[in-house]
Image (cartoon, rainbow, N blue to C red):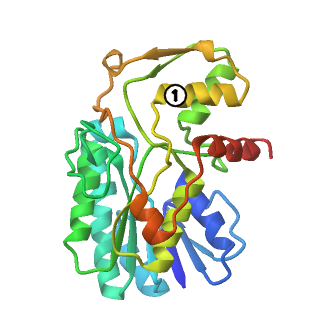
Amino acid sequence: MKILVTGANGLLGQKLVSLLQEKEDIELIATARGKSVQTITRGTFYMLDVTDKNQVDTLISATKPDVIIHTAAMTQVDDCETKRDACVLNNVTAVEHLIEACSKNGVHLVHVSTDFIFDGTHGPLDETAEPNPVNFYGESKLAAERLIQASNISWSILRTVLVYGVTNDMSRSNIVLWVKKSLEEGKTISVVNDQWRTPTLAEDLAQGCYLAAVKKATGVFNISGKDFVTPFDIATQTATFFGLDPSLIQPTDSTKFRQPARRPMKTGFIIDKAKKELGYEPHSFLEGLEILSKQLTR
């Protein structure tokens, strides 16, 4: 099977490239807007701007993948709120280009979406929950989902939550790395205790993408961790695991933060469907910290 990955330089993209290179029955086509940040020993790499319709059409027509796993996106929530044209271009228009190319070439699309399509009034949520985004990032990701669902292509939509992990170039942080770095530097940090999530190890999300791709599974699947916790819980568990001072972590609530974009208060996912239909089995948050810590000491 030939699988093309967009956004190969991102956290999820890097984990997918590593995973797919290990699969002898997979021919990997890795793509990203810039040069590859990791060595690709099995497979090929192409620079690709998914917002450029001609580039998308040309590359997919030339390489003829069986499946595209689309991880490239504008995910900085506050930037999406303040730079809406860029958000639409990256999160909606790019998906339009991919749908057209998939339709033309008979390609199955695995699209990565988010818990931020929900309003956060309740959780954890299953795949039948009604979307109602409270910020523009969520609106853009929901718009992309609806384009895919209305199309004539074969597709999987994988929704995920608060992804964490270690990248090769460490160009982007995430909640676990931020907490660890801040406490190591002796900084006092404020972390909200009134939002709820199911944090997702990047390796687990990559595994979910792989399972959906090889099965060409159709429909919507929740792919996240299984621990339903607050960011404050995440921070204190991270501190304890790495032997850092949890007294530096101050609990606070969402009203104390001035951010351009609203955050949903309670999301998190029920992952029974993915377990049953895909064979998806995520690590616990503690197990995820163990995996992350080994990567940091390499």
- Name the spot of residue 215 as percent of width and height, x first: 47, 79
141 relative position to 46: left or right: left
Q: In percent of the image, x 50 and y 48: which residue is there? A: 225
Q: Nearer the viewer, residue 35 or 291?
A: 291
Element assignment for label 1: helix
Q: In percent of the image, x 34 and y 55: which residue is there? A: 90
- Name the spot of residue 173 as percent of width and height, x first: 56, 38
Q: In percent of the image, x 58 and y 30: which residue is there? A: 178
- How packed mark 1 is, by other alpha carbons closer than 10 Å (few <14, some 14-19, many 20 or more), is some
Return the residue at label 1: 233
The kind of residue tagged 1 is Asp
Question: Which of the 4 quarters of the picture holds residue 51?
Answer: bottom left
| Residue 10 showing in the rendered view | no
- Name the spot of residue 149 as percent of width and height, x first: 23, 69
Please, is residue 187 above or below residue 286 in the view? above
Q: Nearer the viewer, residue 53 or 38?
A: 38
| Residue 113 showing in the rendered view | yes
Q: Nearer the viewer, residue 265 or 261?
A: 265
- Name the spot of residue 99 as percent of width and height, x first: 30, 74
Task: Residue lying at the far right in this picture: please name it.
Answer: 298
224 relative position to 19: left or right: left
Question: Which of the 4 quarters of the picture holds residue 136?
Answer: top left
Q: Quadrant of the N terminus?
A: bottom right
Q: In percent of the image, x 47 and y 34: which residue is there? A: 229
Q: Nearer the viewer, residue 31 or 251?
A: 251
